[in-house]
Image: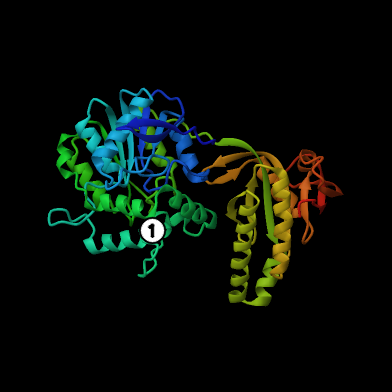
Amino acid sequence: MDLAEIRYAKRDGLHVAYQVLGDGPIDLLALTNGSTISIDRDEEQHWARLDRRLASFSRLIRFDPVGFGLSDPLPSGSAPAIELWMKDAIAVLDAVGSSRAALFAVGVGGLVGMSLSATCPERISGQVLMHTFARLARDSDYPAGLPQDIIDNFVEAVTDPDFAGDVLDDVALMAPSLATDVEFRSWWKQAGQRGASPANARALNVLGAVSDVRGVLPQIEAPTLVMHRRDNAFVQIGHGRYLAENIAGARLIELPGSDHLPFAGETDEILGEIEEFLTGTRGTVDAERVLATILFTDIVDSTKQAAGTGDRRWRELLDNHDQMARRQVHRFGGRLVKNTGDGILATFDAPARAIQCGGALCEGARELGLDVRVGLHTGEVEQRGDDVAGIGVHIASRVQGRAQPGEVLVSRTVTDLVTGSGIVFRDRGEHQLKGVPGEWQLFALSRSPFR
């Protein structure tokens, strides 16, 4: 999904950056995604999928509050405050011509959302509160909270570049299902640094740590859906249960999973519940079909090598292979869909980059003392969550199965698409691919002008 145009609203002479995605009948104002990451983000597949689905039934509005991301900095000497964030939200709604909107609030954004619902009921038609809280710190009458020393240590660990204490892995805490995804980790670090300076990130975390909106809960009249994954270790489920018990008419949905970020982990159920809550119906999740170049690899004689090297050494080789493969896929602009045990499945927007990556994977494997077979085909694939499916994927797998050790083998479709690029192939004749009708002409990469 292409990123929406960045526009600006005005609040007290300051510019508030926002973007609008979709044109559905419902205005849906998003209040953070559970992090300090700005709307000025590179395309990130998990977040993009969430927004794409939300924008399929709404006009999705995202913004950076003043002091963060693309919005103006805070005036000298001032600090972020819920009241200012609320003003930013109203300014954005006014700028897009929205007189009444629903809210999707995550994490600290929930403090703003609940305050808006209580104080501006005429502007808020409903609210979805996910992984949020009335207050974060534990109190004598609020056992769901965290001890203050744990909160203080977290704030220091994630915002102080010179922090000397124990390293805190915020990806493992906030998105454990993506903790081993090297590409996501790289994006997370870079996007977080663009979203807020260390001082601003600290100020936002402190805002969440010291705020207490329990007093506004009885004033909320907007229909409220509270959603919480049961094993969220970052914002534990006791917070969600407290909100559901103290907001009149609120409905609580407890979901399996441990990811705090709403776009990490299983999202179909979350999105279905949000759509049904806001529209009254739950749309069918159609598999998104896109044209892609699909790349499969397989380590040659992996079973034999595992027996010959021993389990420990083989596990080390596999780990090194997987790290190398992730680097090369990222280097050539692809998306690593999954590891297949002793190979990978990846997709690319451009066939030439996929071919280059295939050659680099063969070279990288040889440096590790391994040989891989690489197969490529370009065709339509169905996006099913983070996975892909369809006949195009099946064909690419069969092409890979015909490759020789150390060879990049491609279908005729791929060669036709890179005609004139200078990439040279050897004709490997026609083949029958198991489960695929007809004869398929295959070609082996001979030379690439880009390497």
* On screen, residue 133 above or below 122: below
Kindly indicate the quadrant of the structure image that contains residue 83.
Answer: top left
Residue 423 as seen in the image, left or right of residue 99: right
Residue 31: x and y in percent read: 34, 39
Q: Nearer the viewer, residue 10 or 93?
A: 10
What is the number of callouts on the image? 1
Q: Residue furthest left?
A: 140
Residue 35 as seen in the image, left or right of residue 313: left
**Residue denoted by label 1:** 173
Quadrant location of the N terminus in the rendered image: top right
Q: How is the image coloured?
A: rainbow
Amino acid type of the residue that numbered disc 1 sits on in the rendered structure: Leu
Residue 109: x and y in percent read: 31, 43
Residue 362: x and y in percent read: 73, 60
Residue 96: x and y in percent read: 38, 25
Q: Residues within 10 Å of mark 1 (few under 14, many from 20)?
A: some
Quadrant location of the C terminus in the rendered image: bottom right
Q: Secondary structure at mark 1?
A: helix
Q: Nearer the viewer, residue 389 or 159?
A: 159
Q: Residue sitting at 16 percent across and 53 percent down?
A: 142
Does residue 435 show up?
no
Does residue 349 show up?
yes
Kindly indicate the quadrant of the structure image that contains residue 405.
Answer: bottom right
Residue 121 as seen in the image, left or right of residue 429: left
* On screen, residue 345 above or below 249: below
Q: Residue sitting at 32 percent across and 43 percent down?
A: 74
